[in-house]
Amino acid sequence: MLKLKYLFNNKDLAHMVLSNWESDNVDSDLLNYYRISSNAVYWCRNQGNTFFLRFASAEEKSKESILAELDFLRFLRNSGYPAVDTILSKAGNELEEVNTPWGIYYAVAFKKASGKQLSEIPLTDDIIFGLGKSLGKLHKLSSEYKPVNNKRNDWKEKIDWMEDVLSAFPDETAAKSDLYMLKDYFLKLPTTKENFGLIHYDFEPDNVFYDEVTKSYNPIDFDDAMYHWYALDIQISIDEITEDMLEEQVESAINQFIKGYRGEYDISEDMLKLLSIFRRYSDLYGYVRLLRSVEEKWNNEPEWMVDLRICLENSLNNKKCTFTKNLCGKPTLF
């Protein structure tokens, strides 16, 4: 998540960034539709077709990491995987570096994915099976992917980043303790071509579109992609699809997802037994990102920011209870 100071709806900034792409009308009311979280994303239109303009400050995102994301997306599409496609700027670039009065911003325009978000349709056994199959295919391709020019961060670099953020918070002893335990655990965990590679990290219903005509699953938002064990992607997906399910539905949903996944790529029972540990990693990573986001405070904050800060701080307090649990024993799927 971006720092709170970047969550303002800055339409002047959006217009400046959008001017680098062909659009029907830069003054269109379509810019009233937006979402700002890990990036600013604005709905735009060109020749009647909706596309999405995504940008973030150079303070928040590195040019190299975005280029690495685009390289991976290109590889997936060239391999026949329906990953979200980009739209070239007027200058013929996928990525534009835009110098603005608010600093340098990196921007990319994406085509609209076909179908509906999975979060908008019932998650039947068939849909869940297909989602698992789609993730399995993604990991299979990832295991074959060799970046040429740019490389995304790996789990060690993310751990170092978390340690650096937490160093500014002397009272976060529990989070630091969990971080060191996870780092020690992962350093001893085997990494192979089969179990470790570039993962999506946010492969959940909001980020996957299902096309009923082609029966295809079309993922978006590879912005958090990193090198990690594939089991982390599985854990995140399973947690998201089962979050609001009745207890008696959860086991069946997990089985369908894993069955679909294994139809495309193998995952060992030993790795599945570690999903609770990967959950702790994603919980900690989310916690540190939130902590960094709300760190700065200002006088006379607008009401929406005050409300958002309260919501995020409540989330932080809820996440704290997951820290400093013993990593020993045999973690299970549930």
Image (cartoon, rainbow, N blue to C red):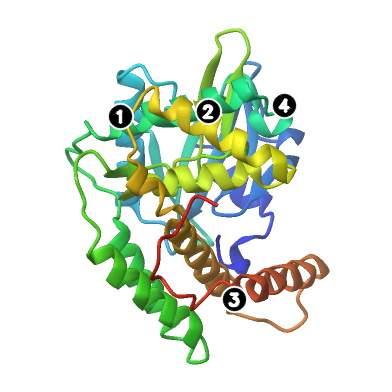
- Examine the image and state in which quarter residue 51 appears: top right
Q: Is residue 14 visible?
A: yes
Name the residue located 36 percent from the left edge and 75 percent from the top edge.
181
Distance CA(mark 3)–CA(mark 4): 32 Å
| Position of 127 relative to 167 (above/below) | above
Question: How many residues crowd mark 4 within 10 Å: few (<14), some (14–19), many (20+)?
Answer: few
| Numbered tag placed on residue 202 in the rendering | none
Q: CA distance from mark 2 to mark 3?
A: 31 Å
In percent of width and height, residue 257 lies at 52, 32
Tag 1: residue type? Lys
State which tag comes first along the sequence, 1 or 2.
Answer: 2
Q: Which residue is mark 3?
A: 320
Residues at discs 2 and 3 in contact (Cβ within 8 Å): no
Q: Which secondary structure lies at badge 2?
A: helix
N-terminal-most mark, 1 or 3: 1
Mark 3 and mark 4 residues within 8 Å of each other at the beta carbon:
no
* Residue 266 sits above or below residue 324 on the image: above
Tag 2 residue: 131
Label 1: how many residues lie within 10 Å, few (<14), some (14-19) or many (20+)?
A: many
